[in-house]
Image (tube, rainbow, N blue to C red):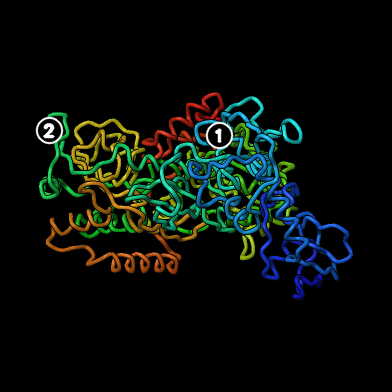
């Protein structure tokens, strides 16, 4: 530990910290523009000047390593004069357009010029003008405002892994540009807007929409993927205007993906706001009572084994649980599923379907082996952690398949399932590497669970890791990379059919009534089935429905989600659903009351407490029901194909978003969809 003095306050800090961090530990605020905790040190704005004993000139505190016995002063007349001089230089070319700048109200330059600036300028020269750059459909540029802090360049190069931003020219002629003026080919590009301390890079879809002080701010959870990034939803008059990240070092640090940030305009488009009934191939508006009457009549005249229910990818856990209870208690049936296709899953033990090493644990990994996964498009924020581990620790990364650019170098294998078997039977060079690495990470993507030998190979991998002490209380190397927000929560709630293959039943037209709770990804050809669709958007599920029950989107109801590492988090209500739409749990509760004259739960609190009791009992009871369905437990050599949803159209909200369409069109030259062999 190092001991030093900051403004006559004794401070003790770890070795390796900078003077700026030491000052912060002493409770002294140091102004800065270029310095950021998550980026490399540039030391080029000079706003963080402090005085150090025995130093003839002020020092840049962000770039100076702290040393034992240093005596630092941050508030002397000399430092105040230096900071005013720096601010005068920064404002020499900065346009005075704060009233029309989207950064107004949350601008570092505005705040610091008020506190540390000077009331007049000695510069009489004309201000420079810099042409605006095209950075794609997400980032609006006004480069005349740029103060050359280079945060955006460092973020693109270090965190996002796309070295497309850089500086050309020198001195006053320096410009930040994408060189070839093209859209930034990254799923994290929107973060440069948060990083920019001035209004040079602002949000294109949000331009001139609102001022920060007019917005209602709600802390919530993202559902665009299974990572569960912490977000803030900003609403104006109950309309979601923007989504921003909240710092959570364990999950998303302070970044969010572009889909998380910009798909929110899809909450306004294609919304279902009233119940519909299909007559002669056309939808007609109806009342809640009318649709409930038809559903009740249909269910009463149908055998219970001919009724099936499917839960979708954005459903919160309360909705999924009450849906399960509706089938168990009201319909006396267990024909419910949370999967959208027939892939292998064993939810008898929680470690079989979560990311056991944790997202933060990726930074401790010595070796990462990707099997049937493309983390860049399936879990963008998790991919950023893998890149961080690769850069900081020089972690060895191996992928069974060539899955294109993942923003870091990795070794590619041949994509054959026989290779996996050889590795986990100790017949491959990689077998020894896995054993000798203290903390290896095996990441199984959803594509892996779709292969014919999934059960055989999964059991083989798990047994091999257990035998070699890679699954223990300290470290668990076995990780499943889930891509949908509702998947882990639904498996925790046991929403999976252990008795029959419901997908065969779908394709063989066994079911007469199919109830879809936000499920839009089922692939089957409709024949005579009566389909009830409950959801927020007029998407694929609504197209084939006979009755539509309009419900709330994730920003319009409180609800729990469990992320891919098994962490339970709550999403909070930020706005209200349109028209007659209701919350998911409420619709099912009212339907149960209409059918049985008795609600399933008296209120939301009772529902939540019942749900948590179920989860706790499931975790205590280790002898869970195993699947009765005959699963292929033999090995068949095949090529593992990495297949995943189109990144910008992965769910109903994204598909309804105009911004996501623009992103897809701007990046059409990059291989983003399809199957990798």
Residue 392 on image: x %, y %: 73, 50
Where 82 falls versus 396 (above or below)?
A: below
Q: Is residue 442 visible?
A: yes
Which residue shows up at 65% across the image and 54% down it? 117
Q: Nearer the viewer, residue 51 or 568?
A: 51
Cα separation between marks 2 and 1? 44 Å
Question: Circle 2: is it few (<14), some (14-19), or many (20+) Cα within 10 Å?
Answer: few
The residue wearing badge 2 is 279
Q: Nearer the viewer, residue 125 or 409?
A: 125
Which residue shows up at 11% across the image and 50% down it? 289
Where 352 falls versus 532 (above or below)?
A: below
Dots 2, 1 in contact, CB < 8 A: no
Task: Please state, as top left, top right, bottom left or bottom right, where the C terminus lies in the image.
Answer: top right
Res 518 label: none
Residue 157 on image: x %, y %: 68, 39
Q: Is residue 375 visible?
A: no
Where 594 falls versus 397 (above or below)?
A: below
Count the numbered circles shown. Answer: 2
Task: Please state, as top left, top right, bottom left or bottom right, where the N terminus lies in the image.
Answer: bottom right
Residue 158 on image: x %, y %: 68, 43
Q: Nearer the viewer, residue 548 or 57?
A: 57
Q: Nearer the viewer, residue 345 or 475?
A: 475
The residue wearing badge 1 is 640
Q: Secondary structure at mark 2?
A: strand
Q: Quadrant of residue 216?
A: bottom left
Residue 426 on image: x %, y %: 70, 46
């Amino acid at each position: 530990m190092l001991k030093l003095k900051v403004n006559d306050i004794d401070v003790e800090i770890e070795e390796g910290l900078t003077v700026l961090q030491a000052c912060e530990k002493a409770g002294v605020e140091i102004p800065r523009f270029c310095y950021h905790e998550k980026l490399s040190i540039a030391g080029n704005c000079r706003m963080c000047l402090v005085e150090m004993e025995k130093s003839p000139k002020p020092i840049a505190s962000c770039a100076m390593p702290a040393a034992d016995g240093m005596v630092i002063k941050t508030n002397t007349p000399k430092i105040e004069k230096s900071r005013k001089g720096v601010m005068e230089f920064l404002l020499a070319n900065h346009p005075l357009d704060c009233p029309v700048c989207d950064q107004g109200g949350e601008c570092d330059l505005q705040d610091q010029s008020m506190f540390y600036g000077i009331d007049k300028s000695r510069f009489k020269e004309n201000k420079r003008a810099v042409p605006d750059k095209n950075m794609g459909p997400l980032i609006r540029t006004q480069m005349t405002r740029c103060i050359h802090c280079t945060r955006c360049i460092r973020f693109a190069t270090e965190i996002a892994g796309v070295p497309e931003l850089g500086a050309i020219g020198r001195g006053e002629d320096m410009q930040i540009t994408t060189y070839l003026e093209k859209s930034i080919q990254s799923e994290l590009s929107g973060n440069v807007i948060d990083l920019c301390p001035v209004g040079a890079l602002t949000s294109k879809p949000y331009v001139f929409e609102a001022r920060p002080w007019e917005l209602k701010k709600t802390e919530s959870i993202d559902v665009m993927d299974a990572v569960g990034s912490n977000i803030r939803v900003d609403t104006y008059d109950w309309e979601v205007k923007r989504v921003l990240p909240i710092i959570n070092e364990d999950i998303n640090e302070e970044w969010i993906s572009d889909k998380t940030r910009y798909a929110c305009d899809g909450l306004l488009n294609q919304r279902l706001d009233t119940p519909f009934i299909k007559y002669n191939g056309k939808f007609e508006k109806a009342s809640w009572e009318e649709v409930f009457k038809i559903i009740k009549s249909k269910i009463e005249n149908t055998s219970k084994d001919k009724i099936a229910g499917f839960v979708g990818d954005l459903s919160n856990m309360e909705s999924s649980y009450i849906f399960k209870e509706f089938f168990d208690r009201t319909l006396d049936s267990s024909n419910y599923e949370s999967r959208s296709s027939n892939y292998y899953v064993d939810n008898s033990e929680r470690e079989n379907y979560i990311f056991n090493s944790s997202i933060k644990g990726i930074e401790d990994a010595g070796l990462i082996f990707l099997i049937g996964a493309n983390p860049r498009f399936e879990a963008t924020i998790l991919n950023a952690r893998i890149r961080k581990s690769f850069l900081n620790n020089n972690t060895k990364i191996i992928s069974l398949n060539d899955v294109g650019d993942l923003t870091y170098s990795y070794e590619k294998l041949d994509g054959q399932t026989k290779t996996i078997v050889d590795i986990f039977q100790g017949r491959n060079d990689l077998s020894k590497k896995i054993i000798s690495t203290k903390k290896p990470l095996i990441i199984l993507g959803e594509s892996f669970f779709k292969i014919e030998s999934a059960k055989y190979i999964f059991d083989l991998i798990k047994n091999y890791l257990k035998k070699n002490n890679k699954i223990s209380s300290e470290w668990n190397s076995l990780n499943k990379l889930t891509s949908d927000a509702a998947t882990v929560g639904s498996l925790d709630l046991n929403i999976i059919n252990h008795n029959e293959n419901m997908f065969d039943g779908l394709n063989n037209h066994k079911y007469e009534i199919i109830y879809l709770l936000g499920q839009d990804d089922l692939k089957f050809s409709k024949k005579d089935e009566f389909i009830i669709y409950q959801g927020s958007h007029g998407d694929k599920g609504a197209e084939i429905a006979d009755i539509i029950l309009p419900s709330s989107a994730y920003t319009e109801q409180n609800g729990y989600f469990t992320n891919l590492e098994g962490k339970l988090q709550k999403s909070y209500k930020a706005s209200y659903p349109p028209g007659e739409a209701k919350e998911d749990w409420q619709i099912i509760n009212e339907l149960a009351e209409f059918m049985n004259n008795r609600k399933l739960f008296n209120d939301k609190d009772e529902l939540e407490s019942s749900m948590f009791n179920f989860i706790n009992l499931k975790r205590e009871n280790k002898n869970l029901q195993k699947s009765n369905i005959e699963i292929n437990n033999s090995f068949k050599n095949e090529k593992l194909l990495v297949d995943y949803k189109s990144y910008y159209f992965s769910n109903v909200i994204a598909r309804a978003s105009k911004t996501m369409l623009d992103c897809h069109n701007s990046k059409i030259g990059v291989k983003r969809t399809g199957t990798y062999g």
